[in-house]
Image (cartoon, grey):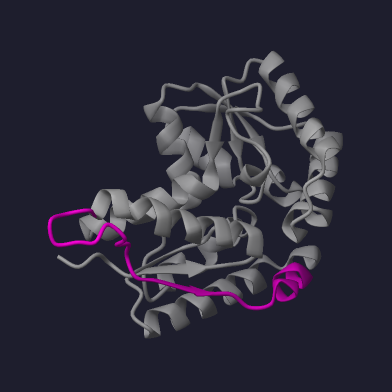
Amino acid sequence: MKPLHIGIVACSAEGAALCYRTICTEAPRLMMGPSTSGHGHPEVTMHTPSFDDYMALIYKGDWRGVASLMLASAEKLARVGADFVICPDNTIHQALPFIENISPIPWLHIAESVASEAATRGFQRIAITGTRWLTDSEVYPQKFAAHGLEYLRPTIAERDEINRLIMDELVRGIFKPESVAYFQQVIARLKGEGCDAVVLGCTEIPLILSDANSALPTLDSTRLLARAAIRRAIEGQ
């Protein structure tokens, strides 16, 4: 059976590129068979408006406007044959409830992918990192609560600095050692507060952090979403 067609509703380039690349490079292992060349992956189509269109609305707190952009992308992806959509951007998931029920095709939720993985691995208290908009929101707390997981957010000052690093550096493809060190410092402090894992809740954070350089086991939201999409496409449900 042919895998389902994955649609990607993209926002910022670095996170979307990592998600797309993960789908295309990890799917062949799962799809390999006697009649394949070993390079197979589901059909993937991506759409994104200008990143500035999103940010103009986010800075104004216009989440319904953000939702309209997301819906417009989903509609375009549906027209070219996508069976379902994913969005490799944690922050704008807080706008998803406005349009989820009227979308022409279903969505996989990035925080659900992370919460499910956290529960499967037996974690109990998760540190949340990401943009200020994300860490202030209920995107992850709602999904964590549904899985019986506790969570902890960075301090307000830490949220502000992490947001600056993401928006001024990571989304622009700038990766500085001192910025990595700051993330490591915050994660180490949250470990001291009793967290046993950290969600990399901005899809660019996995470009600089992993289990190899984090004081806590990492839950890579970008790759977890990509893997959930691969499974959905192959299973055809």
Tell me residue 16's x, y (percent): 57, 61
Q: In the rendered image, which quarter contains the N terminus?
A: bottom left
In this rendering, does residue 108 appear at all?
A: no
Q: Residue 191: image x %, image y %? A: 67, 18
- Residue in front for this viewpoint, 12 or 110: 12
Q: Residue furthest front?
A: 37
Identify whether 53 is placed above or below 205.
below
In the rendered structure, the answer to whether residue 175 lies left or right of residue 100 reads right
Quarter where residue 217 is shown: top right
Q: Is 99 or 125 nearer to us in this picture?
A: 125
Above-or-below relation of 221 to 218: below
Q: Which residue is at the front of the view, 144 or 184?
A: 184
Q: Residue at x 79, y 42 (%)?
A: 162
Q: Is residue 122 above or below residue 200?
A: above
Residue at position x 72%, y 76% in the image: 53
Looking at the rendering, in which quadrant would you find the C terminus? bottom left
Residue 6 visible within the image: yes
Q: Nearer the viewer, residue 119 or 178?
A: 178
Q: Position of residue 112 (x, y in %)?
A: 44, 45
Q: Residue at x 72, y 68 (%)?
A: 62
On screen, residue 66 versus residue 165, left or right, reads left
Residue drawn where x is 53% and y is 62% of the image: 96
Instruction: State whether residue 66 is above or below residue 147.
Output: below
Q: Is residue 40 covered in magenta?
A: yes
Which stretch appears magenta?
32-57
Residue 138: quadrant of the picture? top right
Magenta stretch: residue 50 in it?
yes
**Number of marks in the rendered image:** 0
Question: Looking at the rendering, which quadrant does residue 78 occupy?
Answer: bottom left
In the rendered view, does 157 fall on the left or right side of 146? right
Q: Position of residue 186 (x, y in %)?
A: 76, 28
